[in-house]
Image (cartoon, rainbow, N blue to C red):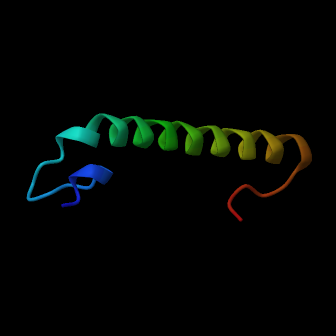
Amino acid sequence: PYSDRGLPLSGEVRPFSKQALFMLIICESLERLLKIILELFSLLYGFPASQ
C-alpha cells in the first residue's frame, strides 16, 4: 500500500532509487563545498577549522 508514496514495498526500491542516488550525490557535494568554504574561511580569518 505504500508504493504510491514512493516508499518501498517488499524489497522494490526501483521507483525512487534514481532520486535517492541523486539526493545522495547532491548532499555529498554540498558537504564537500561546506568543508572547503570552512577551510577557506579559517585560512583567511584564522579560525581553527577543526572546531
Q: Nearer the viewer, residue 1 or 39?
A: 1
Residue at figure coordinates x 74%, y 47% from the top left: 38
Q: Position of residue 10 (x, y in %)?
A: 8, 59
Q: Position of residue 43 (x, y in %)?
A: 82, 42
The residue lying furthest to the bottom in this view is: 51
Please give the count of numbered marks on the rendered protein.
Answer: 0
Image-based side of 45 in relation to 36, left or right = right
Image-based side of 35 in relation to 38, left or right = left
Image-based side of 27 in relation to 41, left or right = left
Image-based side of 8 in relation to 20, left or right = left
Residue at figure coordinates x 23%, y 39% from the top left: 15
Residue at figure coordinates x 18%, y 40% from the top left: 14
Q: Nearer the viewer, residue 8 or 25?
A: 8
For the N terminus, the image quarter is bottom left
For the C terminus, the image quarter is bottom right
Q: Position of residue 27 (x, y in %)?
A: 50, 44
The residue lying furthest to the left in this view is: 10
Up the image or down, 47 lies above or below 29; here it is: below
Q: Position of residue 36 (x, y in %)?
A: 67, 39
Q: Nearer the viewer, residue 11 or 37?
A: 11
Residue at figure coordinates x 27%, y 50% from the top left: 4
Q: Nearer the viewer, residue 15 or 37?
A: 15
Up the image or down, 4 lies above or below 2; here it is: above
